[in-house]
Image (cartoon, grey):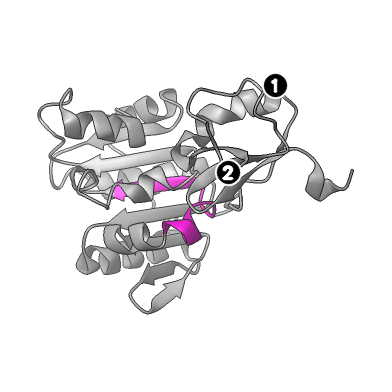
Amino acid sequence: MSRQDQPHLFFLGGTLVLHGVGQETAVPPFFRWLNGHWRCEAVHYRHVLPWLRQQHLENRVPHWTNLDAALQDGRSPHDYQLESLRAWHAADRWGSIVLPTGAGKTFVALRALAETAVSALVVVPTIDLLHQWYARLETAFQMPIGVWYGLEKDAQAITVTTYASGWAHAEALGSRFGLLIFDEIHHLPAPSWHEIALMCAAPYRLGLTATYPEDEEGEKGALLHRLVGP
């Protein structure tokens, strides 16, 4: 059997596809049998991994890389920032950090990015914020920063995009990054925009906001929990 024919998991069009795994095989519950293959939304990648290892199946999903980038920022984090980071790491680097405006959410995210050390996609709601993040990232890591919006599509190990562009190009971006950072995450549940989170395989996710949905048990809160964590 050639390597191409061996059973494996791969990324396609915002989904995870099992190749060479028959319909009779017991698979995790979020898979559906479609057109001769088991398939599920890419957001489930982190939950599929333990089963994939147990079955000794090849994993061809990740196209992200390890990131060797030291944070060039000599500031010492405040205790509340360190506590936020500790809580995020304790949740397997999956969840949102809620801090008031001006409390240094971006600084926390930069530290999270440096500590996770994998390719990262930063998703923001506006072009103004995209440019602000680009400048902060370039200064913080002293390395090329990618930008993906409009006619500018330059993916680097650290890339910034907008919710609209990220959603429109999720099929191209969905397996390139191991960490997703959503700034102003309260915008994510908007129609279409949340699909960037559904269609990306990134096992690590960080949301940032000062205004998390008040009704965490409501529709928006439930969607955020599913896509990014609590």
Indicate the amino acid at tag 1: Gln
Task: Name the foreground residue: 67 vs 142.
Answer: 67
Neighbours of disc 1 within 10 Å: few (<14), some (14-19), many (20+): few
Indicate the amino acid at tag 2: Asn
Residue at coordinates 40% horizontally, 40% vertically from top-left? 205
Task: Name the foreground residue: 163 vs 29.
Answer: 29
Marks 1 and 2, the one that precedes in the sequence: 2
Residue at coordinates 61% horizontally, 24% vertically from top-left? 50
Q: Quadrant of residue 150?
A: bottom left
Residue at coordinates 60% horizontally, 24% vertically from top-left? 27
- Where's the C terminus, which quadrant? top left
Q: Quadrant of residue 147?
A: bottom left
Task: Name the foreground residue: 71 vs 172.
Answer: 172
* Magenta stretch bounds: 170-182
Relative side of 223 to 59, left or right: left
Relative side of 68 to 54, left or right: left
Relative side of 191 to 110, left or right: left
Q: To which residue does mark 2 refer?
A: 35
Neighbours of disc 2 within 10 Å: few (<14), some (14-19), many (20+): few
Task: Name the foreground residue: 51 vs 120.
Answer: 51
Label of residue 54 in the image: 1
Total marks placed: 2
**Residue 163 image position (x, y, % from top left):** 28, 57
